[in-house]
Image (tube, rainbow, N blue to C red):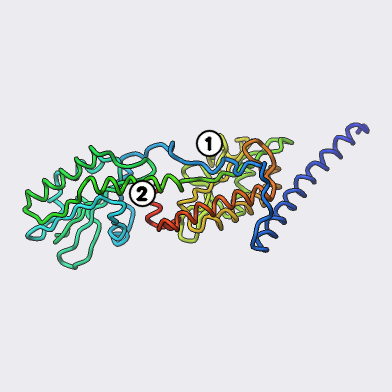
Amino acid sequence: MSEFQKSLLIIAILVVVAVYAYGYWQQWRYRRSLDRGHAEPRVAQRAVATAPVAEVADKPAQDPADHFITDKSAAETCELLDEKIDFIVSMTPKFPVSADILEAFWPRRFDYGKTIQTCGCNAATGAWERVIPESPANYSELKVALQLVDRNGVISDTRLADFRELLGEIGRKQDADMVLPLMDTALERARELDTFCAGVDQMIGLNLVSSGERPLFASEVARAVQHAGMSLQADGTFHQFAADGATLYTLAMSDDTPFQHHTLDKMQVKSLTLLLDIPRVQEPAKCFDDMILLALDIAPALRATLVDDQRVILTQGAIAQIRDSVEAVEQRMLAGGLTPGSAQALRLFS
């Protein structure tokens, strides 16, 4: 081996050692700041976030078929009904009725572009339960609720009017006692709620960029994050789950290319993004801390660096600034009576 080759080898070794040392040092500093209970001074000239605190108004609309809830327990479904979020039509027939009373409604339940929840008071047990077209029970009272607000905005006047008219006609044909809320009041309330939600509907992204010394393969990413407890899901991203099964944050390719089990050994990775959906997680600031620690833990193993959108290494001050923004959103939600990660927050930010 020539002297020149030896020199190149030594330089390469030093670069690898430096990357690992920097990652360890950055992680140590961040852990120390958490232990002290406060962040280091902000770096004012540094950008706050990586994929920065970003509104998600451009999120694609969901398939209308997804809007009819079928996967929640009956008790949970009915407990979630809330006049601040839902337009709730109640009908009490003269005698107990089956789900067939809604025969005209069932084929149209996907027409409104928002979540529909139908609940009935079981005439035999007195318990409220979710009602579907095939429900065998008879009901002394029915409630059909149309969610007014989600990430796609407020329901349109036309769709709400159509929903109200259809349920009103069904109730009148049955000579049932009806509660039909006023449209103007409901829409005004919904617009106020949508404005509040828009102000806190934010995500935080952290970028991990490969050093480029040699190709980084998706299989290496998988091993590193699985060791940290993340798992690859059907959406092509790795998820970190809470004990109750809720997603805390995700790891994806920065260009949105999905990870696939059968191509992990072949897929090369240049940049990764850890993403925290603030309104949908409990204790967002704590989740951010955990996400940062994960990033600092896996960065050396992946020969990657934690950077902002301009590919500038994130300093402790910049990280503290991002954390402050996460905590500010969390506090705004709590002040507005909406707990991050709660069942109602998950409904509003779906």
Q: Looking at the image, which residue is at 14% across and 61% down?
A: 140
Residue 229 sits in which quadrant? bottom right
Question: Which amino acid lies under the numbered mark 2 shown in the image of this protein?
Answer: Leu
Nearer-the-camera pick, 137 or 333: 333
Mark 2 vs mark 1, foreground winner is 2
Q: Position of residue 216 (x, y in %)?
A: 67, 38
Q: Position of residue 46 (x, y in %)?
A: 66, 42
Please provide percent x and percent y for residue 261.
54, 42
Asked which secondary structure carries label 2, the reply is helix
Given residues 317 and 164, the one toward you in this image is: 317
Residue tagged by mark 1?
256
- Please tell me which residue lies in front, 29 or 331: 331
Are the residues tagged 2 and 1 within 8 Å (C-beta)?
no
| Residue with the most extreme right position | 3
Q: Secondary structure at mark 1?
A: loop
Tell me which label, 2 or 1, sits earlier in the chain. 2
Can you say which quadrant of the picture contains the N terminus?
top right
**Structural distance between the alpha carbons of marks 2 and 1:** 31 Å
Residue 278 image position (x, y, % from top left):
49, 50
Look at 47% across and 54% down and name the residue there. 332
Q: Amino acid at mark 1?
A: Asp
Residue matched to label 2:
193
Q: Residues within 10 Å of mark 2 (few under 14, many from 20)?
A: many
> Is residue 143 toward the left or the right of residue 235 in the image?
left
Question: Which residue does the image show at 11% across and 45% down from the upper left?
Answer: 169
At a point 69% along the width and 35% down the height, the residue shown is 215
